[in-house]
Each structure stands twice: as structure tokens, then as C-alpha cells.
Image: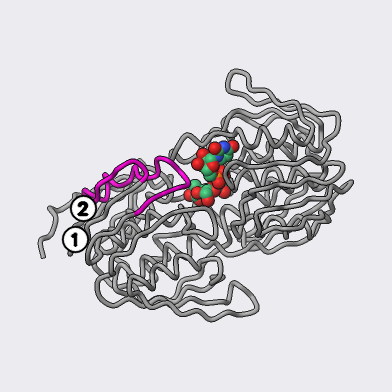
Amino acid sequence: MADKVYISGAKPLRGEVQIGGSKNSTLAIMAACLLVPGEVRLSHVPAIGDIRTMAAMLAALGARVERRGHEMCIDATCFRAAEAPEELVRKMRASFYVLGPMLARWGRARAALPGGCDIGTRPVDYHMRGLRALGAEVEIDRGFITARTRGLTGGRIYLDFPSCGATSHLMTTACLARGVTTIENAASEPEITDLAEFLTRMGAQIHGQGTSTITVQGVDRLHGGEYTVVPDRMEAGTYAVAAAITGGAVTLRGVVPEHLQPVIMKMREMGVSLTSRTALDPYDSELRVHAAGRPKAVDILAMPHPGFPTDMQQPVMALLSLCEGSAVITDRVFESRFKYVAELRRMGADIRLDGRTAVVRGVEKLTGASVRATDLRAGAALIVAALAARGDSEISGLEHLDRGYEDMSRKLSALGAEIERTATTRPMPAAVEA
Ligand code: EPU
């Protein structure tokens, strides 16, 4: 029987929570390790489902992958495969990022079209065009992509939209291409900068990361080394919202405040107090979140970085469902990232959808309900909503949540939440009227 989470809500969270390493940064870095014929040691690798899937992928391709706690050692010296196992690519979109490194090292690569969270059509046309610009022949046949090259060469790539996945995949692949590659309209998310810094540490020559034009000067080979993954801004943002929605006071440790700027600014506009303290080690840097009273309504426009992150749109929607007034939330990144709204409505939220826009009319209270996560960030939204709701909630679909949040029930419980994760079904009492 699958686990469920039971939350008895309306308890303010208090205390301190440690934020782990970035999921999306680690996934891209792990795929990039396939370019390195040597040992790479990574620290602050989160213990989450997606990382386990990527580790299984690298191992299936012949790399040595060892993990102890939050340290991971990857050695792709013996990696020889040129075909990614279908079940792993279907399970997680980021496992498709191994295509370029396979091509760069062995001149051929094959992978199934990727799966992942169901939040839109999520095509891979930019990846394919980019690999062609680097001198590969790329074909799609019966759901598989096959790429071949006699040697990658630098090229000019323009992305129609600043895609995170295409930017990281192509930037990584270009590291071993002969000559210079430029990626125009590149994504500038902190995870891209982190990947570029990792690759540079391993001997790559990359410039312009964090801007919309990235230049890669190809090198003959990369070498092993050590790297610390950047903290996860989405995990931090989720706990900041959990603190705010319960009217609590929580210190998040392991936050790079600049990475969370749009979230911090919008939460301040809502009337939440957020103060940061930066330390030399980002895992010691802190963000203190203190909320008093109902949030004020603010509009949210999810856009590529430095715009408001699409991955935070969902927990923030839960917070805004309790706001004073009405808020408009628009997602310009993914076309169908509002599937979780029906579940929030079950908890009493008043939300209307019109295409990529949601209109939230703030209600005074949410009430506990039995709800199901439909994707990773939807799961985060339901958890934070349940923390604020009066009465008991039952949340299922935890396999989505486990892909991206380490030990969420334990961390929330340490902050004072009444939360239990169990495989035993509990009877749900009728919603409590306050
Ligand atoms: N797009 C295309 N063609 C492509 C690639 C992308 O049209 O070849 C479009 C997408 O359909 C989408 C837009 O470009 O409309 C942006 O997609 P992007 O490629 O940036 O998304 P991604 O790389 O698939 C990553 C994260 C997501 C995060 C987005 C946006 C990973 C593993 N995933 O996805 O994270 O929402 O960037 O920031 O890095 C999550 O963590 O919950 C998550 C979904």
C-alpha cells in the first residue's frame, strides 16, 4: 500500500530547517559527469527520487556511482554505452540530458523521448536543433531519438525560448566540440550558472553563464575534481511559504538570497517579513521568515529567470488562496501547470482558471480534505495548503513529492507541524467548522 501523509493543520511552524542541494542543478551536473573520464566528487547531493533515477541511469550506462549520505562519487572512465535505458528516460525528463554526453564521447547516442511531470507538452525540438548545430545527424523514429556524428564542432544556437533543459544539455555537449559554440537566448537560471561553474572546475571553458548569451570554447578533455552543489531555491521557497501560510516564524538555513529574489520580493508585497543573513558557506546563509495576519493579494507572473519561477507558482497559489482580495497568477513557462487547482478547491480555495491564468479570490480559511498530488510542485502546494487548513487532510500521490523533496514530513514535524506519513489508511473525520 502506498504511503499517505496526514496533516492536522492550522498550527504555526516555528524553528529552523536545513535546505539541501538543488535537485535540478545536481541532475544536470550528474549527466555532465559522463563527459569526464575520471572521478568527480559532489557534495550536498539531495537524497530524493530523481537523483536516484539519474544515479541508476549513469550506472546503467557503465559509470561507477557511489553515494554516502549527501556525498556522491561518479567515475565515467568505463562508460561505454550509447543507448539510454528507455524505462529511466520515460520516468524522468532530465535523464534525456545524457544524450549529448554520449554523443560527445562516442559519436552516437539513442534515447526514448522523455517523460517527467505532466505539466505541458514539453517537446525536445530545441535540444535536437542544437545538437544539429553542433554537427550531429539527429532523427526521431518510433518514439526514439538517434544522433550520430563524426566529431562535434562548435556552432551558433538560438533558442526560441530560454529553455533550462536545452541550455544545460547543449552547453554541456559543446564542452567537447571542436571550436566555439554560442547559445543565444540562453536560460540564466542559477542552476545553469552552477552547471557552468562545475564544468569550468572540470576544465571546460565557458563564458556568459547567468546571461542570455553563453559561449563555450571546446576542449579536448575534461578532468575529475570536487564540487559543492548550490542550495535548492525551490525547497527553500516552499518552506518559506509553509512558514508564511501558517503564520509562523522559521529560519531557513542554506539559502542564496539572490536566487530567491523574485519570491522574496513578492512575499514581502504580501506583507510577509523576510530577512537574510549571508555567510561565506551558502549552506550557513539564512533566510528568516515571519508572517503575521492574512497575506495581501498580489499578482504573480511566472517567467524565465530572473522572473518569478514557475516551480514556485503552486505553493504561492496555496498562500494566495488565503489572501485579502483577489490575485491573478499567470504561467508563461508551461501551458498546463494548473492541474492541481481542482485539489486546492476541495480544500475550499476559490480559484477560476482561464488558460494559462488563474484568478484567486482569497478566502478566510481552508478546510482539511483528502487530496492527491498530480506532480511534484502540485504536491508541495497541497502540503502547504494542508498545513494551513483547519482540520485533517490526507495527501496521496507522494511518489511525486518524493522526487524532489528530501524528508519533507520529518522536516515539517521538527518545525511543529502535526504530520504523519504512513501506509495505514486513517479514517478521515468530517471537515471541522471553526
Ligand atoms: N521547450 C520547447 N522545446 C524544447 C524545450 C523546451 O518548446 O526543446 C519549452 C517547454 O515546453 C516549456 C519551456 O520551453 O514551455 C521551458 O521549458 P524548459 O526547457 O525550461 O523546462 P525543463 O528544462 O524541461 C526545467 C526544470 C523544471 C522547471 C523548468 C523551468 C529540470 C530537470 N527541470 O525543466 O523543473 O520547471 O526548467 O524552470 O531542470 C521541477 O523541478 O518541478 C520542474 C518541473
Q: Residue type at mark 2?
A: Asp
Total numbered labels placed on residues in the image? 2
**334 in magenta:** yes
Nearer to the camera, 363 or 211:
211
Chain part drawn in magenta: 329-356
Label number found at residue 35: none
Pointer 2 or 1: first along the chain: 2
Circle 2 packing at 10 Å, graded few (<14), some (14-19), many (20+), is some
User: Residue 164's spot in the image, x, y percent?
Assistant: 59, 48
Q: Is mark 2 within 8 Å of ligand 1?
A: no
Query: SS class of the residue under badge 1?
Result: loop
Q: Is residue 127 above or below residue 326?
A: above
Q: Ligand 1 shows up in which quadrant of the image?
A: top right
Query: Which residue is pictured at 59% across the width and 42% down the height?
Result: 94
Q: Judge left or right: residue 222 versus residue 85.
A: right
Q: Residue at position x 26%, y 64% from top?
A: 388
The stretch drawn in magenta includes residue 86: no
Name the residue rendered at 65%, 59% in the picture: 210
Read off the residue under disc 2: 350
- Residue 141: name its quadrant: top right
Q: Position of 4 compared to 84: left or right?
A: left
Q: CA distance from mark 2 to mark 1?
A: 7 Å
Q: Residue at x 29, y 61 (%)?
A: 320
Say the numbered circle drawn on residue 363.
1
